[in-house]
Image: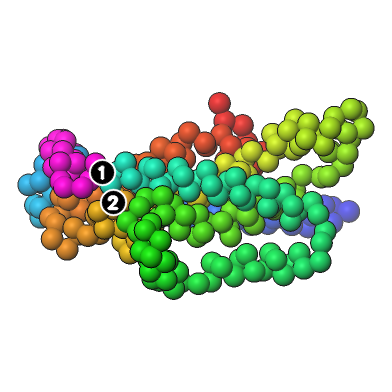
């Protein structure tokens, strides 16, 4: 009995050691991934808020933001086409977000709730759209928009971004609806709700985190997309297209400030909807 208890105790200690080692390994990997993402962002941020001389200097100082200055950002914002590009990017991203959500929400609900012939093929065909390279879609669309008089318009570019975002958005929202049991809607209807009321008061609050996640994807995709924006616009360029156009002739200060300007809106947008993202994993954000 004593020997068996000793063996059980040793096995328990070994299991605890393995769990501790796995936990430490998980933390190390998570820290490395976080550093991989945050260090470049921090470096871009530090170079965007210093003088142009400090940006061009080599080697760089150990402490960032020395000297701290808004000179680099003021130089970037005063460059030709930047403020107009920021406004165009915001408009395109918001229009893309609204159109994608309005189209993908009912499509995702139909795919998740209704069984009809060819449903799996329909899902596959939606996803297959993402298999086409952007260049395959951009060039024919540019010719079509020129013939229709829609070329060089931020709204035609928003339609292009909507087409790019819709496949993934439909599948994401569809999977979110599928995770909500249909019995909840039936129970609400038993207690007197109409089908629309059951959807509004029972299903919609549960799927809002998933819709918010798809909105993040759509906004970031539209904000950072550069190839279609460069092909379909000339005078009304978005910010990424304008930065790419001037990149070969720009200084290091312009490049760092441009990188920071492209990062900030997406980070701000994700900050405001973070509670919906946390709720997807059962966490509460206050």
Q: Which residue is mark 2?
A: 236
Marks 1 & 2, CB-CB < 8 Å contact: yes
> Residue drawn 75% across and 30% down?
201
Circle 2 packing at 10 Å, graded few (<14), some (14-19), many (20+), is many
Decide if residue 59 is on the left or right side of residue 211.
left
Query: Relative to 214, is 184 on the left or the right?
Result: right
Residue in the image at 72% along x and 70% along y: 121
Residue at 53% x, 47% y is 99
Could you say which is closer to the camera, residue 79 or residue 261? Answer: 79
Q: Which residues are magenta?
A: 65-83
Left or right of residue 172: residue 35 = left
Instruction: Identify which residue is drawn at 39% across, 43% down.
Output: 91
> What label does residue 84 carry, if any?
1
Q: Nearer the viewer, residue 104 or 29?
A: 104
Q: Secondary structure at mark 1?
A: helix
Image quadrant in which you'd find residue 51? top left
């Amino acid at each position: 009995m004593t020997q068996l208890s000793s063996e059980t105790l040793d096995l328990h200690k070994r299991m605890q050691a393995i769990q501790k080692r796995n936990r430490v390994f998980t933390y190390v990997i998570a820290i490395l991934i976080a550093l991989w993402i945050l260090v470049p962002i921090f470096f871009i941020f530090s170079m965007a808020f210093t003088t142009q001389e400090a940006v061009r200097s080599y080697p760089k100082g150990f402490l960032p933001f020395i000297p701290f200055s808004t000179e680099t950002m003021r130089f970037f914002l005063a460059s030709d086409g930047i403020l107009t590009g920021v406004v165009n990017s915001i408009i395109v991203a918001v229009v893309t977000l609204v159109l994608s959500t309005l189209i993908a929400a009912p499509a995702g609900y139909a795919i998740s709730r209704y069984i009809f012939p060819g449903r799996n093929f329909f899902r596959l065909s939606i996803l297959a759209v993402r298999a086409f390279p952007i260049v395959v879609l951009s060039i024919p669309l540019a010719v079509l928009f020129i013939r229709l008089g829609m070329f060089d318009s931020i709204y035609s570019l928003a339609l292009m971004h909507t087409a790019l975002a819709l496949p993934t958005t439909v599948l994401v929202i569809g999977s979110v609806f599928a995770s909500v049991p249909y019995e909840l809607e039936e129970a609400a209807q038993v207690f007197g709700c109409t089908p629309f009321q059951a959807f509004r008061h029972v299903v919609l609050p549960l799927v809002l985190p998933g819709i918010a996640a798809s909105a993040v994807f759509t906004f970031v995709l539209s904000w950072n997309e550069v190839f279609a924006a460069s092909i379909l616009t000339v005078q009304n360029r978005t910010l990424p297209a304008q930065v790419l156009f001037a990149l070969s002739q720009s200084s290091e200060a312009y490049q760092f400030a441009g990188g920071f300007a492209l990062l900030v809106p997406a980070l701000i947008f994700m900050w405001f909807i973070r509670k919906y993202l946390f709720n997807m994993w059962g966490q509460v954000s206050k």
